[in-house]
Image: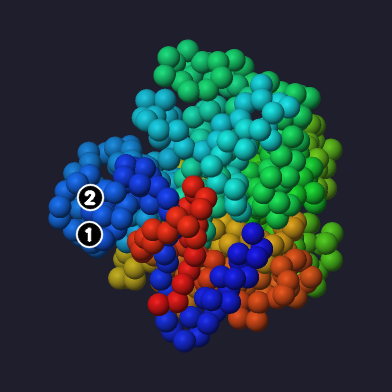
Amino acid sequence: MAHGLVRRESVDTEMHKSGDKRKTFVFTKKRGYDVTRNPHLNKGMAFTLEERLQLGTHGLLPPCFISQDVQVMRVHKNYAMRKDDLDRYVFLMALQDRNEKLFYRVLLSDIERFMPIIYTPTVGLACQQYGLIFSRPRGLFVTIHDRGHIATILQNWPEKDIKAVCVTDGERILGLGDLGCNGMGIPVGKLALYTACGGMPPQQCLPVLLDVGTDNETLLKDPLYIGLRHKRIRGQAYDELLDEFMKAVSDRYGMDCLIQFEDFANVNAFRLLSKYRNKYCTFNDDIQGTAAVAVAGLLASLRITKSKMCDHTIVFQGAGEAAMGIAELITMAMEKEGLPKDECIKKIWMVDSKGLIVKGRDNLTHEKERFAHEHPPMKSLEDVVKELKPTAIIGVAAVAGAFTEQIIRDMASFNERPIIFALSNPTSKAECTAEQCYTLTEGRGIFASGSPFDPVTLPDGRTLYPGQGNNAYIFPGVGLGVIACTVRHIGEDIFLTAAEALAQLVTEKDLDEGRLYPSLCSIGEVSFKLAVQIMEYAYKHNQATLRPEPSDKEAFVRSLTYSTDYDEFVVDSYRWPEDSVTVQSCKL
Ligand code: NAD
């Protein structure tokens, strides 16, 4: 498809420079209900009379013509009548199944409102109820029994030009544990954000659920469960499935097809990342995406504390995927400032369920071993904080209230501006609330959370707006950038570049108000800017393989992005003989 991209670049670059509006035409041989019931083609009552006549849909629609703007208004009104978040999720998914452009247009009309429904936290609830709310399949289901045939299953997927795959095996869905095949809600939601936030065309995105069984007894007994009804198959068979899947995807869609791993259990997440990272174009969002968003928050904090990363001592509460990813990227940021690697690692401490991670402790995994220092064992986080006097504490253990009043007060006593990140999700699992952080530190605490918190007004009248370290700030932009210039392997340096770019997008005014991230409603522009920065970086460091290098990268990235405007239909079966849909941008 490289040829297609180049063609579109030249057209759109020209349009971008001249300020022309891009117009998209669709050529199709489909007729009648095949058009109105196809979510990629359907535009409801916005089809013009000419289109209705030509497409054979005249009479299949009410006679009125309704613009997309009015359709958006109708969706908003219907949405407001839904009684709870799960109902809102079902409503939005039904819209996605019916009219894709309208779905994305609605999301973009108020992304702050809709993101918590199609993504965390509601998507978690949706996965728990997936069997119940299931109406139409979305995404590709590959099971452990499909070994030997994955390439054939990929052939069944109707799109040939896939650029981004998001895959899960459903073993650790958010903080909800093993949801097996019901985990499909996660790749579906993530890829919807690739389009809504990053502008990736939805037809280029493929959600995949690898079903190897589930150890969730409740699901195994549930007559509505949609997955394989046996325990998880592990070991060699599991590894063979993953190996075959990675190869089959790359064979069919190219070595530059991005494969994002999502919500794999700890034990597989690290292992698979190190196994595949130098072989395929892949990353793990729970480890690397989280790392980038947290480090972006830290880099923004440094602009407040007027310090360098290597001036800090950081204690993690938790030593899992999130903690390891963040710690690795902090180390990289410190190294970039000139501190030797060993010294960087010494500035990072971790506390897990058994206490402070120290050298000689039993049963340390390879990942934990890296951050184990010479120190007597300590059990409680309070004691650790008192002893180590960190400048920053980061909570990623999903232990609600772990940042006690004493810890927050101690942090405020050692530091003029203590950095306190309570990143555990959902809100009920946060280590402390924004209000606790701000009030106990007299407004000096620099706070970020995993789940959103309301603004806090202090007794002195100042209102502070807590930063939400949402991974959606990172993965759509990284995906878009990597795909745009066909990076083959995504190193940690790409994530550090994304973190730096994100931190730079925070304004001084944002920082004054306590915000460590740009406003969520600007996420489309944020993703676009991250993508351009990643392209710049990738070309500079010889990681981009797309040739020739686009001279105007902004225009190039824009030319790849999806428009939610309805296309115009051109019926011409001689010029477009295939029975598929071909979309081409044309100058007005
Ligand atoms: P994980 O299961 O990989 O790791 C959890 C870690 O917590 C483990 O190391 C475990 O030993 C440790 N732990 C458990 N109980 C503990 C205790 N009592 N004291 C200290 N440590 C304890 O999970 P993860 O993927 O690392 O996610 C952890 C949390 O971070 C979740 O709540 C998740 O929602 C959140 N998270 C937030 C973001 C974000 O804000 N953008 C991104 C990813 C994860």
Mark 2 CB near ligand 1 (8 Å cut): no
What is the quadrant of residue 481 in the picture?
A: bottom right
Q: Is residue 81 left or right of residue 43?
A: left
Secondary structure, mark 1, is helix
Residue toward you, 474 or 508:
474
Which residue is tagged 1? 49
Identify which amino acid the numbered label 2 is placed on.
His
Query: Residue pushed farthest front?
Result: 574
> Badge 2: few (under 14), some or many (20 or more) residues near its Cα, within 10 Å?
some
Q: Residue at x 43, y 40 (%)?
A: 123
In percent of width and height, residue 57 lies at: 27, 48
Viewer can see residue 512: no
Image mark for residue 58: 2
Secondary structure, mark 2, is loop
Residue toward you, 422 or 199:
199
Give the total of numbered labels. Answer: 2
Q: Residue at x 75, y 75 (%)?
A: 540
What is the quadrant of residue 533 in the picture?
A: bottom right
In percent of width and height, residue 375 lies at: 79, 46
Circles 1 and 2, Cβ within 8 Å, touching? The answer is yes
Which mark is first along the chain, 2 or 1? Answer: 1
Residue toward you, 365 or 104:
104
In percent of width and height, residue 159 lies at: 55, 46
Q: Is residue 89 left or right of residue 327?
A: left
Mark 1 CB near ligand 1 (8 Å cut): no
